[in-house]
Amino acid sequence: MKQLYQDILDSAQKGKKLLAILVDPDKMMPEGISSFFQSVNNSIITHIFVGGSTVNDEATEALVLEIKKQTQLPIVLFPGDVTQITEKADALLFLSLISGKNPEYLIGKQVEAVSKLRTSQLEIIPTGYILIENGKKTSVQKVTQTQPMVRSNIQHIVNTAKAGELLGMKLIYLEAGSGATHSIPDEIVSAVKQDLQVPLIVGGGIKSKKQLEMTFNAGADVVVIGTAFEEDASFFDQIK
Ligand code: 1GP
C-alpha cells in the first residue's frame, strides 16, 4: 500500500512532527541490531531511513530484511547510489541533488535507476535534496563532487527549494551532511518552510534534544538523525 507520503503530508498539515533514524548499512553491526532496534521501538522514532554514501552492493537489501524482522516502522530508502535500491523497503526517496551542478546527481543516476524502478512496488517519492555548508567537507560533497550552498545566502536556498517544489518534487530535504559540525541553522529552516507547500525534511549534525526541538520549532516536518544514535546509545533516552 503506497500510503507513506500521504501519511507524511497529513502529519505535516496537522503539525505532528516525525523523526527518522538514519541507518547506514556499512556501520550497522549484525550482532548489535536486535538491541539497537529494541531501543528504536521504545523511542519516539517514526521512520527508518536506510542509506549511506559508500555502501557495498547488496548490504542494503540484507539490512532491510533484517530491520523488517525487528520493527514495524516504515523503511524508507535514502540511497547514496543506484545499487542501494531494493524492493524489500517500503519507499524510496528519489533524490535529485538540486543544490549542485553535477548532472550525474541531478538526473544521471535517476535515469540509471529506471530499469530497477519501472516495475517496482516501492513507493517512489521525488525529493529535492539540498546540501548546505556545515563547517567541514562531508561525504555527500566528496562523492557527488558538488559544492554545498552557502549558509549566508538564505534567499538563494529558499529559491532553490521552491524551484524543486515547482518542478514537482514532493519533499524538500535540507542536508548539512552526516556528522556535520553545524546543523542547518534555524533561520534557514524557517525561511524555507515559510515558502513551501510540500513537507520539509532536515538532517545532518543534530546531536541533542534541544537541537531537535529547535529544528522542529523552526519548521522541519521530518528530522533525520544518524550519528547521534550510532555514537551514543543513551541518546534514545535523552530524546524521550
Ligand atoms: C545525513 O541527515 C542525515 O544524511 C543524518 O545526519 O548522521 O549527522 O545525524 P547525522
Image: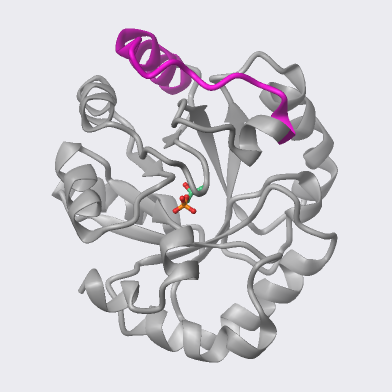
User: So how many labels did they put on this image?
Assistant: 0
Give 3 or 27, whichever is nearer the viewer: 27
Quarter-of-image position of residue 13: top left
Q: Which range of residues does the magenta coloring cover?
A: 143-165
Residue 160 sits in quarter: top left
User: Residue drawn at (53%, 87%), measured in percent from left and top?
Assistant: 70
The answer to whether residue 151 is magenta is yes
Q: x, y percentage for residue 191?
A: 23, 21
Placement of 15 over or under 67, stated as above or below? above
Q: Position of residue 42 (x, y in %)?
A: 31, 84
Q: Is residue 118 visible?
A: no
Q: Is residue 159 left or right of residue 88?
A: left
Q: Residue at x 41, y 72 (%)?
A: 232
Q: Which quarter of the rendering shows the C terminus?
A: bottom left
Whether residue 187 is visible to the viewer of this picture, yes or no, is yes
Q: Identify the residue shown where x is 33% and y is 13%.
A: 152
Q: Is residue 14 left or right of residue 198?
A: left
Is 91 positioned to the left or the right of 220 in the image?
right
Residue at 78%, 46% in the rendered image: 82
The residue closer to the viewer here, 73 or 59, is 59
Q: How is the image coloured?
A: one colour
Magenta stretch, main secondary structure class? helix
Foreground residue among 26 and 179: 179
**Residue 222 on image: x %, y %:** 33, 49
In this picture, is 140 found above or below 49?
above
Position in image of residue 88 (x %, y %) = 68, 69
- Residue sitting nearer the eye, 182 or 204: 182
The verdict on residue 230 being magenta is no
